Structures are given as structure tokens and as C-alpha cells.
Image (cartoon, rainbow, N blue to C red):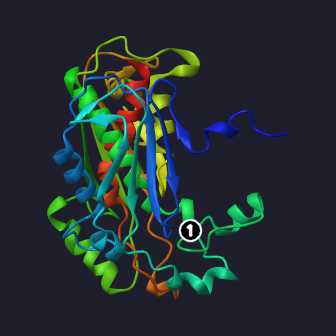
Amino acid sequence: MQSIYWKKMNTFGDKWTFTSFGESHGAAIGGVLDGVPAGLSIDFAMIREELERRAGKGMVGASQRAQHEPDEVEWLSGVMDGVTLGTPIAFIIRNKDARPEDYEIFKHMYRVGHADRVYEQKYGIRDWRGGGRASARETAARVVAGCIAKQELAQKGIRIAATLVQVGAETDPAKFADTIAAYQKDGDSIGGIIECRIQGLKAGTGEPIFDKLQAHLAYAVMSINACKGFEYGTGFGGVTQPGSAINHISGGIAGGIADGSEIIFRCVFKPTPTTPKAGIKGRHDACVATRAVPVVEAMTALALVQVL
């Protein structure tokens, strides 16, 4: 029996619907964002900056491909003179540094830790060129859509800011670059934890029971490549503490509803499974979490515009 959710496998949201398309080493990636109100002035410079953050320009351990892709957004519809028309916003980002030939070895073998095998089991065919839709390349389109959502939220006084707070076992930001560099030098990779803070969300936002605010946030963030866990408030660490010591910690949400205070959540990203140490060559990140920060912000914004 086919899932009732099949139509949403490439689409996020109901109020603002975002559909992404494209493969990692195809002609382009892009998206269609519908539901954006007319009259919103788009800050294109901000979108450019967010895409550069995702690309990890100048970051230690960032993917060579990401740093070489220009990520130039071509706006196809929905925007005129920098202002939204209220119609669907369509855009593409052409893949100018794609090298599908680098992945020909994977035509007849599966990469450990990737979605290669399950995609073929599900569809009977797969895009072996860097994982196709399963590649983190797809997240560039999310950043564009999420940036528009962030601009709408900013008009309502809502701010979203994510930060890398842990790399491996290291929690000192001043040592993150050296930690990543050490793993990269060894031909390996390492994971990380991102913390996201939401300010300005009014008390009462969200619904109880099955439509909790934290459920929307978790659904959005857990859709990001390599994300393996989500926590808010006391989180997983709270299991070691007595209730009397942590009963005041809400994380900004109680009963699935925003309480008006700052919302804080964390998400964990696994190490890249494709590494030289594993015998697989490529242009991969030594720590995907470093470039996932703006993607977490983008997906958080796209989740919030659904519940306001």
C-alpha cells in the first residue's frame, strides 16, 4: 500500500510550500516556493551571504566542490524589481563544477553509509553521480527558500541564529578548525553539534498533542542530510538529572506551545562516511556540521512560517 505522504517526498510545508528539484551532478538544482505574500522586498545580498556560508568559503575541511561552485541564483518567476508578486517563486542554481565521471566506479557498487542501496531497492534505479537527490548539494536550494522565510519572519520580529557548538568531543570554538584539520590530515572525518536559538516567537505559537511546535522543528531539521538527532530544553542530558534540578528548563516550549522565552534546540550531524581512509576518493567535507549551520536556520524558518 502506498504511503499517504507520497506527494510530499520532495515538498515541505502546507502554508508555504517549498518543492526542491535537481540532482547533485545534473544540470541544476532549484526550487519552487509558493505561499509567499506579495510585497516582500527580497534581500538578494543576504541570500548570497547565506549560500556562501553553506559553501564554507575559506572553512577548514569544507568540500572542495562546494567552495568552487559559484551558486548563482537565477530567478524564474514570482519576483519583479526585487519584490514578491504573491505568485510561485521559482529559481534554479546551475551546477557548474559537477564531475559525474568521478563517480563512475559507483555504477556497480554501493558506498557504505550512503543511501545508494536503499534508493535502488525502492525505485529499481539510482543516480550514482554523487548520490543524486541524496547529496547535500540539494541543501543549497533549501537555503535560498529558507532565507526568504527568514526575511518574512524578521518583519514579525522573529530572529533565528544557529551556531556550531561541538566538533567531535571538542567544545571550544577556538579549537574547532584544528580539530577538523587533524581528521582531514588523517584522511578521516568527524561529526558535530549545532545549536539554534529562536527569539521573538510569541507565546501561544504551536498546538498541543500531535501538532506540537517542537515536532514541526524536529521534522524540518531531521530532513537535513546527515542529521541524526534533535533535542530541546533539557534534551538527552536531562535523563541524568533529578526533576527538581531541571524542572525550570523549558527550552522555550511547554506542552508543544511556545512560552514566549527564547527557544533553544540542538541537532547532531554524523561524520561523512565517504573518506580517503575508507578507501573512497572525492571532494568531501571533513566535517559536514560546519556547513550545515545555515541549512538548520533555513529549515527552521520554513517550519516557523507554517505555524504563524
Residue 104, picture quadrant = bottom right
Judge whether 308 appears above or below 137 on screen.
above
Q: Position of residue 191 (x, y in %)?
A: 39, 64
Q: Is residue 107 left or right of residue 47?
A: right
* Residue for point 55% across, 60% down: 134
| Relative depth, front residue between 254 and 293 | 293
Outermost residue to the right: 1
Q: Is residue 254 left or right of residue 164?
A: right
* Residue for point 25% across, 23% down: 39
* Residue for point 39% across, 79% down: 283
* Viewer can see residue 235: no
Residue 2, picture quadrant = top right
| Relative depth, front residue between 183 and 56 | 56
Q: Which residue is mark 1?
A: 131
Q: Is residue 102 left or right of residue 120?
A: left
Q: Is residue 185 left or right of residue 99?
A: left
